[in-house]
Amino acid sequence: MGSAMASNLQAAGHVLTVWNRTPEATEPLVSLGAKAARTADRAAQGEVLCSMLANDAAVRAVFLDSGLLDAMDAGTVHVNHATISVALAEELAAEHEKRGLDYVAAPVFGRPDAAAAAQLNMLVAGKPAAVERVRPVLEAMAIRLWPLGEAPQRATVAKIAGNFMLAAAIESMAEATALTRAHGVSAADFLDVMTQTLFAAPAYQGYGKLIAEQRFKPAGFTLPLGLKDVGLALAAGETARVPLPFAGVLRDSLLEALAGGDAELDWSALSLVAARRAHLDGAG
C-alpha cells in the first residue's frame, strides 16, 4: 500500500525521500526518481512525513522507541496512514505536541489496486492548519478526503469501525453461501443475486466476487491483518464500555482460519472457515 501511495506522490510532482524496514521495497520508487534513506531519521527531514506501517508494534518501534520524533524539525507534519489503536493514536498526538510537531491521522479505505490508481477514500483528522498544509499531498493519493475533526483519534476509530463492518460483511457472505451451497445453490449464483439487488454496494460486490471465485491469492488484505483490526475494535470498545458482541464472533472465525493454515490468504477466505464448519469442500 505504501509503495503504491508513494508512486502517486511522485506522479504528482512531489520530491520524495523513502525508507522501508525492508530496503529492497524502496527500489521501484528509487528507479522513478525517489531518494532512498538508509535510516528512518534520514527520511524524516522534509516538511511532511507520510508513514504506512503494519501495526502498533511497528509504529511504536519506528516513531517512539527509536527517538525518531526527536530527530524531526519543529513544524514538521507527520501524516500516519496506518490503522492503529485508539490508545496509540492518542499517545502519538501527545508526543508530537510535546515536540512542536503536527500529527494528522489519515487512514484509508481501499485495497492495493485502489491505492495504485489514487482512488483511496481517506479519513482525515488533525489540527485544521496542519491538514491544510498537507492537503495537496493527501489529494494526490485519494479520490476523496473525509474530514473528521481535530482530534486524530477520531479518524483512527472511524477506520477501525469501518474495517469491523467489512469483516462483518465478509463473515455474513461466508455463512450465507455455506447455507445456500448445502442446499444446492452455488456461491457464484447466490452472490450474483445478492450483490446486484439487496447488497449492491462496493464492499459486497468486491469481496463477493473473491468468495465466488475462491480467489484468495494474492491477498489484498491478509487474515492476520483482519484479526489485528478486529482486535483493535474490541480494545476500543472495552475502553469506552461499548459492547461489540459480533466482534468476538469475528475474532474466533479469524483465529480458526489462522489455525487452519490460511495466514497468507486474503481475509475473504473466511468463506473457507464457514465451508469447513458445514463439511463442504472448498469449491463454491
Image (cartoon, helix red, strand yellow):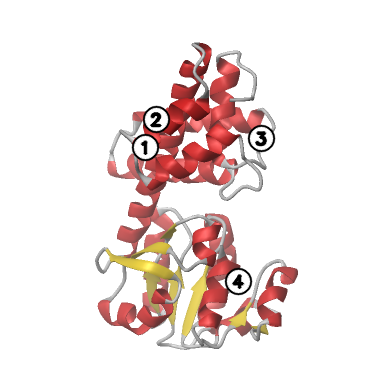
Give the foreground label among 4 and 1: 1
Q: Earlier in the sequence, mark 2 or mark 4?
A: 4
Residue 142 % position (x, y)? 41, 69
Q: Type of residue at label 2?
A: Val
Q: Is residue 78 left or right of residue 281?
A: left
Separation of marks 3 and 1 at Cα, in angstroms: 29 Å
Q: Earlier in the sequence, mark 3 or mark 1?
A: 1
Secondary element type, mark 2 = helix
Q: What residue does disc 4 label?
A: 66
Q: What residue does disc 2 label?
A: 193
Q: What residue does disc 1 label?
A: 196
Q: Are marks 3 and 2 in contact (CB under 8 Å)?
A: no
Residues packed near mark 2 inside 10 Å, few (<14), some (14 to 19) or many (20 plus): few
Q: Earlier in the sequence, mark 4 or mark 1?
A: 4
Q: Which mark is residue 143?
A: none
Q: What residue does disc 3 label?
A: 262
For residue 231, say whether it is visible. no
Q: Are marks 4 and 1 in contact (CB under 8 Å)?
A: no
Residues packed near mark 1 inside 10 Å, few (<14), some (14 to 19) or many (20 plus): few
Give the foreground label among 3 and 1: 1
Q: Which residue is pictured at 43% across the width and 53% down the height? A: 85
Secondary element type, mark 1 = helix
